[in-house]
Amino acid sequence: MLETARRYRRYGRSPVQETSDLLRKIQSDPCNAFITVDSEGALRDAAAAEKVIESGSEDVLAGIPVAIKDNICVKGIPATCGSNILSGFVPPYDATVIAKLRERGAVILGKTNLDEFAMGSTTSTGSFGPTLNPWDHARTPGGSSGGSAAAVAAGLCSGALGSDTGGSIRMPASFCGITSLKPTYGSVSRYGLVAFASSLDQIGPMAPSARDVAILFDAIKGHDGKDSTSVPKEYGPTDLDGLDLKGVRIGVPAEFFGEGLDPDVERAVRYGISTMEELGARIREISLPRVRYGVAVYYIIATAEASSNLARYDGVRYGSRSRDAGGLLDLYLKTRSSGFGDEVKRRIMLGTYVLSAGYYEAYYRKASQVRALMARDFDEAFAGCDLIAGPATPVTAFGISEMAGDPLSIYLLDIYTIPANLTGIPALCVPCGFGREGLPIGMQLMAPHFREDLLLGAGMAFQDRTKFHKVKP
Amino acid sequence: MEALIQVKITDTQVLHVAALARLKLDPEEVGRFQRELNSILEYMDMLAEVDTSGIPPMHHPVPMVNVFRPDVAQPSQSLSDALLNAPEHEDGFVAVPKVIE
């Protein structure tokens, strides 16, 4: 992103050339990263940005081509969420994050593929076919923001937006070898983000480097009166010089290196941690005893919230409507049964069950209490360290349909990413090595609420010392 | 021992939950969801080992209560924009099948 901005100013590269080159690459993209490409709009935005740059603007985002996950509303461009139930839906408004990017002159190339309603870890459960991993087309890019991750990794855009409810930004970033941030809950407006699980969802940036991620994060963060969960506070700019890691205390939770962790991932993440130690960080082992319950807690809370949020898709006000309904109830039943795919139905069913009479106490209430205890574990840990480091995912990218038909095994892949969503803290994923088969591995850093400055600064320091983020598929 | 192993969710419950969620399942889906939900719910049993007595449930990751704004009209979507995506509409209203006989 910074390189593109420099090319625009130093080497006479024009945003229109850059955008048309990318649009051509997207047309022949073998990975199916995009669902909708807005060539006309992108070229128009690029031409406008060109004038702004010619008039002397130093804004690094002017003319920068970005891709948007297809659960974020862009006015006039279909928002599908990868679901048949939203076929034909064209948002009449821009999400707040889109309005903010437009204000800065960013060029919106189009909408990227995802798991249906962002529910999944493979970017294959939607109705637009699977996205393939640019590093190995036989493998998944991870999910659910796999389209955005693949687009960044394949060089089809300078940066992208994704959404993260249980790891949906960090997991595909790790599988595709890019940098990404799940911001603090409440720091980025969700106005215009299609809701999945409202106490967990966050929009976040995905890009080749921590500096690029910081630039995008600075552009989209801030209080928004249109989102009642948006936190009113001062959001200062991120220091792009990076953080001096000397004396920074980094906690390494023993629970993140247990059973199920691929030895290649462990080796790369340990290497990443020792690199930060060489840069002056003080490493200490910590314990987060209740993270082992994270997956169980998450799949109760997230599905409960999803079952409620997805009740709005009834064929009445927008999206598809069953044509042969014999009354209103029949309209709901037929529209929803034919509109939702398997994974979405499974989660709606699970969420409805855990909220239903007789099960609410044992499941939903119990999970919400364990969630509170997990938050205490993190509070206690952060009393003794500034950052927490560990793997982002237990494995590297797996075969496209390797885990089809085994929902629980796929859910368990979220074990390291879920805690940041349940507790609302920010988490950064940076490339830290490669596995036996040459597939990228991501290291996850977590910080207390609203300390993205520490995360991004540490990410920049790490990337100033290492080259993993510069390796292309 | 066998008799003590309880099924977490039965076919009948699957159908009940589907009705609550306004989903119509075919017999193949009922069987498959019963098996899948059962194994997921069995996994969730691990929560029973956590002592949560006296712990208030956490519903929101950043503590915030009732967010108010001044009661002043603000620009909102036009009627035509709001109806743009309606599968059927008539005289400025969304049209649905007859509700009251």
Image (spheres, helix red, strand yellow):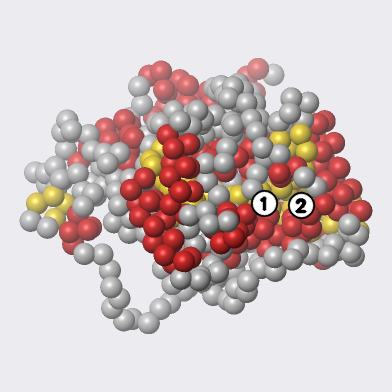
Q: Quadrant of the C terminus of chain A?
A: top right
Q: Is residue A306 visible?
A: no
Tell me the subunit letter for badge 1: A
* Label total for image: 2
Q: CA distance from mark 2 to mark 1?
A: 8 Å
Looking at the image, residue A406 lies above or below residue A240:
above
- Residue drawn where x is 60% and y is 73% of the image: A235
Of the pair A423 and A183, the residue shown nearer to us: A183
User: Could you tell me if the residues under marks 2 and 1 are in contact, i.e. CB atoms within 8 Å?
Assistant: yes
Judge the density around disc 2: few (<14), some (14-19), many (≥20) Cα neighbours within 10 Å: many
Of the pair A328 and A359, the residue shown nearer to us: A328
Residue wearing tag 2? A463
- Residue A317, horizontal then vertical, whole percent: 24, 49
- Tell me which amino acid carries mark 2: Gln
Q: Quadrant of residue A87?
A: top left
User: Seen in the image, is A2 located left or right of residue B66?
Assistant: right
- Residue A204, horizontal then vertical, whole percent: 56, 54
Q: Element type at marker 1?
A: loop
Q: Is residue A237 visible?
A: yes
- Residue drawn where x is 22% and y is 58% of the image: B81
Residue wearing tag 1? A209
